[in-house]
Amino acid sequence: MTPGLVDEIVVIDLLALFLAVAAVEIIWYVVKKAFPDQVRDLRFFLTFIVVIVPFVLTVCFGFAIIN
């Protein structure tokens, strides 16, 4: 592999990571505003971590792999 290709792959993966973190942060902000009482519940938080976060990561890194 050429060094330029490796650099490009690293940049794309870092952008995917940044996009995933930003998307999770935005989703968490919206959920906090929409369901203020639910956010304090441990089951709701664990469900968010187990369901929403992996889904967002899969989508973002899936796009990075496709690219």
Image (tube, grey):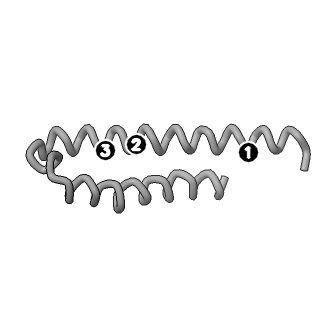
Q: Is residue 48 above or below residue 25?
A: below
Q: What's the CA distance linking mark 3 and mark 2?
A: 6 Å
Q: Residues within 10 Å of mark 2 (few under 14, many from 20)?
A: some
In this rendering, would 41 be left or right of 56? left
Image location of residue 61, percent across then percent down: 57, 53
- Residue pushed farthest right? 2
Q: Which secondary structure lies at badge 2?
A: helix
- Tell me what residue is drawn at x 12 percent, y 46 percent: 35
- Asked if 4 appears above or below 41 in the picture, the reply is above
Q: Amino acid at mark 3?
A: Ile
Q: How many marks?
A: 3
Residue 64 numbered mark, or none? none
- Left or right placement of residue 52 versus residue 37 in this view: right
Q: How crowded is the residue under tag 3: few (<14 C-alpha within 10 Å), some, or many (20+)?
A: some
Task: From the viewer's perspective, tell me whether residue 66 is left or right of residue 52.
Answer: right
> Which residue is at the front of the view, 5 or 47?
47
Percent position (x, y) of residue 4?
Answer: 85, 38
Q: Nearer the viewer, residue 45 or 23?
A: 45
Report the Cα–Cα distance between label 1 and label 2: 21 Å
Q: Which mark is residue 23?
A: 2
**How far across and how far down the image is residue 18, in percent?**
52, 38
Residue type of the residue flagged with mark 1: Ile
Residue picked out by circle 1 = 9
Q: Are marks 3 and 2 in contact (CB under 8 Å)?
A: yes
- Residue drawn at 62 percent across, 39 percent down: 14
Upstream in sequence: badge 1 or badge 2: 1
Do the residues bearing badges 1 and 2 touch, measured as CB atoms within 8 Å? no
Residue under the image location 57 percent in, 58 percent down: 62
Task: Identify the secondary structure beneath mark 1.
Answer: helix
Q: Which mark is residue 27?
A: 3
Residue at (28%, 43%) from the top-left corner? 28
Task: State the image coordinates of residue 21 (x, y, percent, origin top left).
Answer: 45, 41
